[in-house]
């Protein structure tokens, strides 16, 4: 049964998060491969390795609450991935693709930050203290990853990007 209690909402969100992290682990590899901007490439590669830790921490959260780890599809994330694939199918200029991928990654961080903030809050309310701490740890790394991506904008050499066709 779902949608009746706070616990239902928490479990559904946790399963969606497990889906998001597993999908992003693959997506970040694709992003790192297709950009040719050094700082962006590093940011994607580093965050991919953190994403592996996020998956591991989520498995610990499932352990702590005594529920089998399971993924639940989240259409919001599928939409981001589909938008990316549609964009790359149009063979964009490399410099434009770099910026598209930077924005796409920032959108996924915002999604993760919103989801983890709410999951940590619910875990706390449900008395799952250790789970709440693990979720907060992932949340902090998502916030840092977003800051890192945003800081790349400050040094971005926009001269190299075509401004109109
Ligand atoms: Fe993550
Ligand atoms: Fe992330």
Image (cartoon, grey):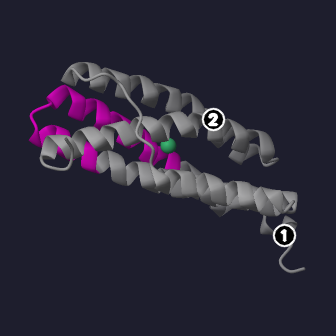
Residue 28 horizontal side relative to residue 23, left or right:
right
- Please, what secondary structure does the residue beneath circle 1 have? helix
Residue drawn at (57%, 28%) of the image: 49
Mark 2 neighbour class, 10 Å CA radius: few under 14, some 14 to 19, many 20 or more: few
Seen from the viewer's position, the closer of residues 155 and 21 is 21
Residue drawn at (22%, 35%) of the image: 132
- Furthest toward the front, the residue is 1
Q: What residue is pinned by disc 2?
A: 26
**Does the magenta portion include 134?**
yes
Q: What residue is pinned by disc 1?
A: 159
Query: Is the residue at mark 2 in contact range of ligand 1, meaning its CB lies under 8 Å from it?
Result: no
Q: Distance between the residues labelled 2 and 1?
A: 31 Å
- Furthest toward the right, the residue is 165
Seen from the viewer's position, the closer of residues 13 and 111 is 13
Seen from the viewer's position, the closer of residues 130 and 152 is 130
Q: What stretch is highlighted in magenta?
A: 118-147
Mark 1 neighbour class, 10 Å CA radius: few under 14, some 14 to 19, many 20 or more: few
Q: Position of residue 15 (x, y in %)?
A: 35, 37
């Amino acid at each position: 049964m779902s949608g009746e209690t706070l616990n239902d909402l928490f479990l559904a969100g946790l399963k969606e998060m497990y889906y998001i992290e597993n999908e992003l682990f693959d997506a970040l590899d694709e992003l790192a491969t297709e950009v040719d901007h050094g700082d962006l490439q590093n940011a994607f590669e580093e965050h991919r390795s953190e994403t592996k830790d996020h998956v591991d921490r989520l498995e610990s959260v499932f352990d702590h609450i005594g529920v089998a780890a399971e993924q639940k599809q989240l259409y919001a994330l599928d939409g981001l991935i589909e938008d990316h694939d549609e964009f790359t199918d149009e063979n964009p200029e490399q410099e434009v693709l770099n910026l598209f991928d930077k924005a796409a990654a920032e959108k996924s961080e915002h999604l993760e930050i919103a989801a983890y903030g709410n999951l940590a809050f619910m875990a706390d309310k449900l008395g799952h203290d250790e789970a709440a701490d693990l979720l907060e740890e992932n949340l902090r790394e998502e916030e840092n990853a977003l800051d890192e991506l945003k800081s790349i904008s400050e040094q971005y050499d926009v001269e190299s990007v075509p401004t109109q066709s």
